[in-house]
Amino acid sequence: MTGKPFLSLRGISKTYAMGPARLGGPVRNLHAVDDVTLDVLPGETLGLVGESGCGKSSLARMIMQLEPPTSGTMVLKGRDPAELGNAALKEARRDFQMVFQDPYASLNPRMRARAIIAEVLRNYRFGTPDQINARVEELARQVGLSAHLLDRFPHELSGGQCQRVGIARAIALKPRLIVADEPVSALDVSIQAQILNLIVELQSEMGLTLVFVSHDMSVVAHVADRVAVMYLGRLVEIGPSSDIFSRPLHPYSRTLLAAVPRPVPEARQRHASARGELPSPLNPPSGCHFRTRCPLATERCSAERPQLRSIEGARQVACHHADADAVGVHVTENLHA
């Protein structure tokens, strides 16, 4: 996982124009993604985590070119997809595919599983009908889907089986990048581990670059090499998975980890919890977006937006109080106050 980034984002933002709060009032803007700069290396699994509404899925959809960014640039395998024409973009999509959150909603209910997987192969003129059918059955074996299930409609399959169909469709053209948007959040807990293990196996087997979007830190810990923590449209911490899970530097990262259920009380981390509710992206706080919930907040946090800065080698954090000693002191004082 070295060399030039396979995916590079620079200053990516997404703003949605909303209706006025009251009749005749000004148009409001919802800032879903705010100035995101990020690199993903070839063969890397990057976990993108944060609460619901923080902009993870909006960023994923922009990476997939399903929505254009309001500002910023993206380079994917040396090219900016936004500058490609329709035909060139279609051809480029061979290299980047998506696994969606809802396994039922992402599949055509009027098509059998075999036809759903075969559709992408036909669209890219993979070969003769016999060759396409052979490839579909090969993909089914690869994702652990029994051959007799290929002739069923989505409503005749379980959630886990539907997600296997979606994964088979995503890897059909042997892409180099997969964006997995909450791929297990809609599944039963007993099935989640099976799908996660399948994704990890495919990533290793195919040498995939993977962007794994989730709100669940325990799920991300299972798959990610590196983690990017997102809050209210902004990246607040980036670093190796082992470092962030053993010693998070941003107060929001600490809050996410503290929320992970632990069966042994003695193993639960004593981190200061965030206060209050997630602010509205229609009216985010000034300075640091997290300051209204942060146990470390000072006047500087409201006046000055913290920028991502390198700290402790490969880690980046956007916090005025993220120095190693300061974080420990402030949190300890808050816990014993």
Image (cartoon, helix red, strand yellow):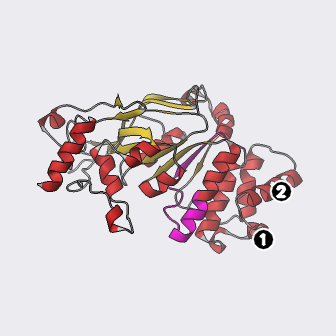
Q: Earlier in the sequence, mark 1 or mark 2?
A: 2
Callout 1 crowding tier (Cα within 10 Å): few <14, some 14–19, many ≥20: few
Which residue is denoted by mark 2 in the rendering?
A: 133
Q: Is any atom of residue 141 visible in this view?
A: yes
Q: Residues within 10 Å of mark 2 (few under 14, many from 20)?
A: some
Considering only vertical position in the picture, is 211 above or below 136?
above
Observer-nearest residue: 293 or 265?
265
**Quadrant containing the C terminus in the rendered view:** bottom left
Q: Quadrant of residue 322?
A: top left
Q: Quadrant of residue 164?
A: bottom right
SS under mark 1: helix
Q: Residue at x 86, y 51 (%)?
A: 131
Residue 291, percent across and down?
A: 20, 43
- State the residue lying farthest toward the front: 266
Residue located at (72% from left, 43% from top): 174
In x, y percent, where is residue 139? Answer: 75, 55
Q: Give the foreground label among 1 and 2.
A: 1
Instruction: Decide whether residue 317 is among the magenta residues.
Output: no
Residue range of the region highlighted in magenta in the rendering: 173-196
Helix, strand or loop under label 2: helix
Residue in the foreground of this view, choosing between 162 and 225: 225
Residue 181 lies in the magenta-colored region: yes
